[in-house]
Image: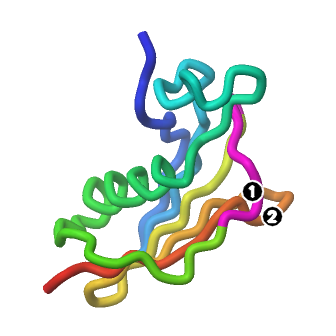
Amino acid sequence: MATQYPSVINQQQLNNQCILTLKIPADLIYFEGHFDNEPIVAGVVQIAWVVYFGEKYIGFKIPIQDIKSIKFKRLMTPEIILDLIIEQQASTLKFSYQDQQGLFSKGVLSAST
């Protein structure tokens, strides 16, 4: 059965910051049709994961109103392991996905208050 979230291999929490080591499963539901020969995790899915994990691990439950400073640098593909770093600052969530080779994506999600 296809899944919609990566596996959490490890987690660290420091105050308003959470570092999650994630493994992108080969059976990720979002790979279907995106794309057949080279499946990738779409940017909108990456943002949805930040919202999901931000609520689950930091308790950030305020609706997102704006996305700022978003950058997509590298493609996320099946079976990779990476870190998702989420930091809450007032009504924003700063995030980055990265591994030892560098940055996949980063941005700031702002909430309505």
Image coordinates for residue 110, horizontal then vertical, percent? 33, 81
The furthest residue to the right? 101
- Checking the image for residue 85, the label placed there is none
Image coordinates for residue 27, horizontal then vertical, percent? 55, 19
* Residue that mark 2 sits on: 102
Q: Residue at x 64, y 72 (%)?
A: 71
Q: Amino acid at mark 2?
A: Gly
The furthest residue to the top? 1
Residue 91 seen in this snapshot? yes
- Checking the image for residue 99, the label placed there is 1
Residue 16 seen in this snapshot? no
Q: Which residues are magenta?
A: 72-79
Does residue 19 sit above or below 88 in this rendering? above
Left or right: residue 55 versus residue 30 is left
Q: Is residue 74 magenta?
A: yes
Q: Amino acid at mark 1?
A: Asp
Q: Most prominent secondary structure in the magenta stretch?
A: loop
- Residue contact between numbered discs 1 and 2, judged by CB atoms under 8 Å: yes
Q: How far apart are labels 1 and 2 at the CA level?
A: 5 Å
Q: Quadrant of the C terminus?
A: bottom left
Q: Residue at x 73, y 48 (%)?
A: 75
Q: Residues within 10 Å of mark 1 (few under 14, many from 20)?
A: some
Q: Say which quarter of the image contains residue 31.
A: top right
